[in-house]
Amino acid sequence: MVRVVSLVPSLTEAVAATVPGALAGATDWCSHPAGLDVVRVGGT
C-alpha cells in the first residue's frame, strides 16, 4: 500500500476521503477530516 504525508490541507481531506488508510502524516494546519489520527509534522 502507498503511504502519503500530506503537506496541503485540501489534499489531506481529498486523500482521506478517496484512499482510506493511505495517510501516514499531515501538517499541523490540516484540520479536516476532523479527528484524523496521523503523525503531525510542524511548520512555520
Image (cartoon, grey):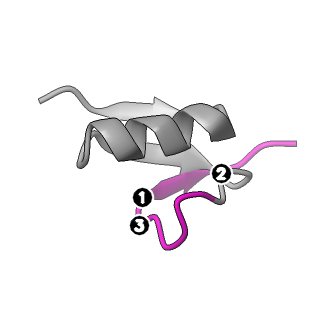
Give residue 38's mark: 1
Find the magenta span and give its range: 32-44
* Residue 39 image position (x, y, % from top left): 46, 56
> On the image, numbered disc 2 is attached to which residue?
30
Three-letter code, disc 1: Val
Q: Distance between the residues labelled 2 and 3?
A: 11 Å
Q: Do the residues labelled 2 and 1 touch (CB within 8 Å)?
A: no
Q: In this view, does 13 lie to the left or right of 3?
A: right
Q: Do the residues labelled 1 and 3 touch (CB within 8 Å)?
A: yes
* Residue 28 image position (x, y, % from top left): 69, 55
> On the image, numbered disc 3 is attached to which residue?
37
Describe the element under mark 2 as helix, strand or loop.
loop
Query: Who comes first in sequence, dot 2 or dot 3?
Result: 2
Residue at x-position 26% and y-position 37%: 19
User: Pointer 2: residues within 10 angstroms few (<14), some, or many (20+)?
Assistant: many
Please say whether residue 37 is one of the residues in the magenta stretch. Answer: yes
Query: Who comes first in sequence, dot 2 or dot 1?
Result: 2
Describe the element under mark 1 as helix, strand or loop.
loop
Q: How far apart are marks 1 and 3 (CA)?
A: 4 Å
Residue at x-position 46% and y-position 64%: 36
Describe the element under mark 3 as helix, strand or loop.
loop
Q: Residue furthest left?
A: 1
For residue 24, above or below residue 5: below
